[in-house]
Image (cartoon, rainbow, N blue to C red):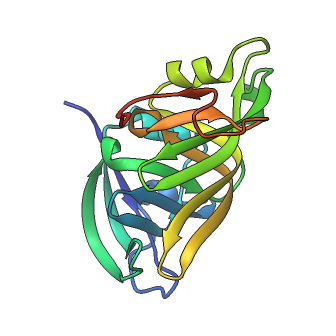
């Protein structure tokens, strides 16, 4: 049995619960998750661990106080409580600083583009020098962080772009991933992963 992590979010209108008892003194940040049915968001206090580590350590998440936006229509509603499997999360990003600098190793940032269901993510994957970024991406744990990222999706008024310092991508749900430098067509340099659709 996998473990479940309880995440209590707060909406800006202040109408919902704020935090769990272990969150005192930690920074409150925006948390956004993208699933097949749309965008889930709220504000939360995260621990000091990296977001990608937290997502990889748990198989499912109990979310409380979620603002759900159905895409592309844009209908919104507040959901008091829901359970979502990691396998249902395409992407997740949160505000606030990156992980502990002391735990970082020397890496090279290389641009990649990842297609996950209705979402397109452009960002940098960090791998050791001399390691192919696509091979590195394919060998990581399921939730892979991309830095200096942009998420593209269709909203009620057309195409939307959201920038985030770090976007964590579910590698297992990626339709494809390719390098973003010097690629003229979507098929060139593409690596199919996870639930690739042919």
* Whole-percent x, y for residue 166 in the image: 66, 48
Write the residue at 56% across / 34% down: 177
Q: Quadrant of residue 38?
A: bottom left
Q: Is residue 171 above or below residue 163?
A: above
Is residue 86 placed above or below 10 in the rendered structure?
Answer: above
Q: Quadrant of residue 69?
A: bottom left
Drawn side of residue 110 relative to residue 188, left or right = right
Residue occupying image coordinates x 38% and y 30%: 194
Horizontal and vertical percent for residue 25? 61, 59
Q: Residue furthest top?
A: 130
When the figure is inspected, residue 152 is found, relative to residue 189, above or below; the finding is below
Q: Is residue 26 visible?
A: no
Q: Is residue 197 visible?
A: yes
Of residues 85 and 38, which is closer to you in this image? Answer: 38
Q: Is residue 138 left or right of residue 95?
A: left
Residue visible at 44% across and 38% down in the picture: 175
- Picture quadrant of residue 195: top left
Q: Residue at x 41, y 73 (%)?
A: 72
Residue 12 in the image: x percent, y percent? 52, 82
């Amino acid at each position: 049995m996998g473990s479940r992590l309880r995440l209590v979010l707060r909406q800006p209108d202040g109408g919902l619960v704020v935090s769990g008892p272990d969150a005192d003194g930690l920074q409150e940040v925006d948390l956004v998750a993208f699933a097949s049915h749309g965008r889930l968001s709220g504000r939360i206090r995260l621990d000091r661990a990296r977001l990608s580590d937290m997502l990889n350590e748990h198989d499912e998440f109990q979310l409380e106080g979620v603002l759900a936006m159905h895409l592309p229509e844009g209908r919104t509603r507040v959901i008091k409580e829901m359970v979502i499997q990691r396998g249902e999360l395409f992407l997740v990003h949160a505000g606030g600083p990156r992980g502990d600098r002391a735990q970082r190793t020397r890496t090279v940032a290389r641009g990649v583009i990842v297609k996950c269901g209705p979402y397109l993510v452009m960002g940098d994957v960090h791998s050791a020098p001399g390691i192919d970024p696509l091979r590195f991406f394919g060998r990581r744990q399921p939730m892979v962080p991309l830095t200096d990222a942009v998420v593209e999706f269709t909203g009620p008024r057309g195409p939307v772009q959201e920038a985030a310092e770090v976007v964590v991508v579910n590698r297992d749900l990626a339709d494809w991933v390719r390098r973003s430098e010097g690629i003229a067509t979507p098929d060139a340099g593409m690596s199919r992963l996870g639930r690739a659709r042919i």
